[in-house]
Every structure is written in structure tokens, then in C-alpha cells.
Image (tube, helix red, strand yellow):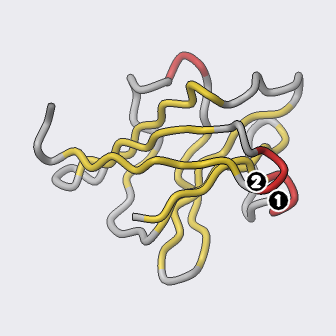
Amino acid sequence: SNPDMQMVMLNGVENHKDAKAMVFWDKKTKEVYLNAEKLPKAPTGMQYQLWAIEDGKPVNAGMYSEDKDSQIALASISKAQAFAITLEKEGGSSVPTMKNMFVMGEI
């Protein structure tokens, strides 16, 4: 209900058509929240990582965990053209593992 909050739907990519997630991006504070309602449970030792696509390049937008779902900001992102989620080893990666991309959505 916050008028500063922009919702970005992330839809499943080719190998994960049923996956879905929603990013909530506060345009005033730049905080990014994630609702990962339709992502499969991450396997042991793996974790979902949110990416913002800025000027065509992926920028780490935080590591997802169930306790943060829609409640705790994952990162502060000043600009983005899209968001995507990959499954990475626990603790994250400095670059996205493209073959492990689950969802993506343009703004």
C-alpha cells in the first residue's frame, strides 16, 4: 500500500517455468524486498541470490533466506532495469551462475 513501493514480477525462465517471485522496490529509500513464494526450497548448501540488472550488468542485490521473506530488505539498489534470481552456493557469488537462473523480470 506504500505509494513509493514498486512491485516487479519475476517469472520463471526456460528450465523453471513454474517459478515466480515478487520484488518490492522502495523508490524513496532504494531498499529491495523479496517475496519468493513460488521458488522451490533451496537444497542444503545452496541459497537464492537476488540480482539487479543495472546498465546491462548484474549487481548483487542480496541473499535470500526464508526469515527475510518480504520482511527484511536484502539490499539498497539505486537503479535497475530488471531483477533476477539465481541459485548459488550458500553465502553467494560475485557473479551470477546463469545456468542456475530461476526467474527474471523487467521493470
Residue at x 14% of width, y 48% of height = 4
Marks 2 and 1: CB-CB under 8 Å?
Answer: yes
Q: Which mark is residue 29?
A: none
Mark 2 or mark 1, which is nearer to you?
Answer: 2
| Front one among 97 and 9 | 9
Q: Position of residue 5 (x, y in %)?
A: 22, 45
Element marked by disc 2? strand
Which corner quadrant of the image does residue 79 belong to?
Answer: bottom left
Q: Which residue bears the numbered disc 2? A: 101
User: Where's residue 7, x and y in %?
Assistant: 33, 46
In the image, what residue type sits under mark 1?
Thr
Q: Residue furthest left?
A: 3
Secondary-structure class at tag 1:
loop
Percent of width and height locating residue 30: 28, 53
Q: In the rendered structure, which amino acid carries the disc numbered 2?
A: Met
Disc 1: which residue: 97
